[in-house]
Amino acid sequence: MARRKGVVLLVLLMMCYAVAMVGGSDGGRARREREEEGDERGRREREEEEEEEEEGYDEGGGGGGRRREREEMFLMHEMKTVVRTDAGDMKVIKGFDSGGIGGVVSEKQIHLGFITMEPKSLFIPQYLDSNLIIFVRRGEAKVGSIYKEDFVEKQLKGGDVYRIGAGSTFYLRNTAEGQRLHIICSIDKADGFGWGSFQSFFIGGGTNPMSVLSGFDTMTLATAFNVSTSEVRDISTRQRSGPIVFLSEDLHPPNIWAQFVRLKQHEKLQHLKQMVDLQEAATKEEEEEPTWSLTKLFKSVFGEEPNGEDNQRKAPDSYNLYDRKPDFRNNYGWSTAIDKSDYWPLGHSDVGLYLVNLTAGSMMAPHINPRATEYGIVLRGSGTVQVVFPNGTSAMKAKVREGDVFWVPRYYPFCQIASRTGPLEFFGFSTSAHKNQPQFLVGRSSILQSMKGPEFAAAFGVSEEKLRRFVDAQQESLILPSASAAPPEDGEVKSERRRRRIERVVGRFGKGMIMDFD
């Protein structure tokens, strides 16, 4: 009996041991599965957070919006409308002072202007306290101005560049039949005097805009013009349509500017000179002359520009960027730049221009501009602009498309990359009229290629042979093939995100479920 009890007890002990072993094994496996599931869940959550951040970067939401704000610091979004009428408008983006960024030497600011004019319209005569360089993006225009006591009219077409000096009276007229005129211009102040960024002084005008002549009392104007005070009141209140007006009498009532453009050339000169002479005469009648003089201000109207050269007595012609042979061209794009050696009026403003066209997926190699700050406007296509801080960290990696404006401070490394679906074309201004001498950091014409040797090898911590293989791998110069770096279009991005989401959701059901779809 005692033996039977001992056997039963032994069996029970063995069964308990077996259960404990199995339970422990199952428990360990369960714990491992829970840990693995937790790791997988954590990985998925991290991926989702990264994706949400990426979407926020593109769509401006949540924390991604802050990242977007930080990484688009060299895009220029704040555009202000300074003129708007039924006949057209002018918008301006204020330039940045690069002196406050990274210790870069302070340079003059260039503001960017965008003028749109309807067919048969006129931007009425005015002068600016700033130099103006206009680029005809689309359409045709006639610009009239006074140069060295002569009245000059120039017919401009798409691609033309033309300079108007500070203080020079001018007007713009859209001459293309049934086509809008689009102009991009740089605006830089001639000196420190003025109110705000730049100032327009309208010679003609009435109640909208007000002519600068309106500041003189009626009797002074009547005496200066040798007319009656009633005639002065009549002509000084008729213009109410704004700075950009229609010239077509078929659609609008006749106005003084429609009559003005029909005058002969010598009559236009006399008309503008009379207004200038009037202001000088009226100024002399003031009891005390201000610290600044209208006489001095109007000197440039008659062509007394600084740094004038004996062989530049004739009024300058325009310069066409589209007719110029590119400075560089290969299978991946082309680029051209003009400076004062190509178009001498640029020397008076100390501003240069450039135009670049990148084929789909190509890249303007990383480079720096040691001479000037650059302002760029995307004319066509889309892509990415990358800018780097002096400490080697990313300052900006932003998508750009037609109409976007960006700037790059002097000395900062940067590059532009076209999207994979089409070319990227951009035009811009630089803050120097001297010949541009960019230093490329990558490619056959790069400084690494020119200076590869033991010093650079030591700087990178590699052998000379390894550095040489690395640098020589790129056979192209300046404009490079870069399909892998080129940004996809928005549709491609969304499609890729959708695919990743589906893979993650399906993956949660296990491999067996994936096989069931086959």
Image (cartoon, rainbow, N blue to C red):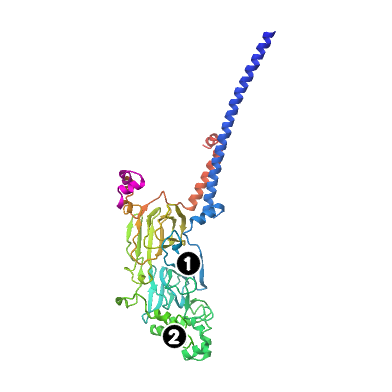
Residue 299 seen from this side: yes
The residue wearing badge 1 is 94
User: Crowdedness of circle 2 by 10 Å Cα count: few (<14), some, many (20+)?
Assistant: some
> Is residue 310 positioned above or below 497 on the image?
below
Q: Is residue 498 magenta?
A: no
Q: Nearer the viewer, residue 7 or 499?
A: 7
> Is residue 399 positioned above or below 253 on the image?
above
Residue 25 at what x, y percent from top left? Answer: 58, 26
Q: Amino acid at mark 1?
A: Lys
Secondary element at image label 1: loop
**Residue at the right extreme?**
1
Q: Nearer the viewer, residue 235 or 491?
A: 235
The magenta stretch is 450-468
The residue wearing badge 2 is 280
Residue 330 placement: quadrant: bottom left
Q: Main secondary structure of the magenta part?
A: helix
Residue 375 at what x, y percent from top left? Answer: 42, 63
Q: Residue at x 48, y 62 (%)?
A: 76
Residue 303 placement: quadrant: bottom left
Residue 501 seen from this side: no
Residue 265 at what x, y percent from top left? Answer: 39, 82
Whichever of callouts 1 and 2 sits on the residue coming sooner in the sequence is 1
User: Crowdedness of circle 1 by 10 Å Cα count: few (<14), some, many (20+)?
Assistant: some
Q: Residue at x 50, y 48 (%)?
A: 495
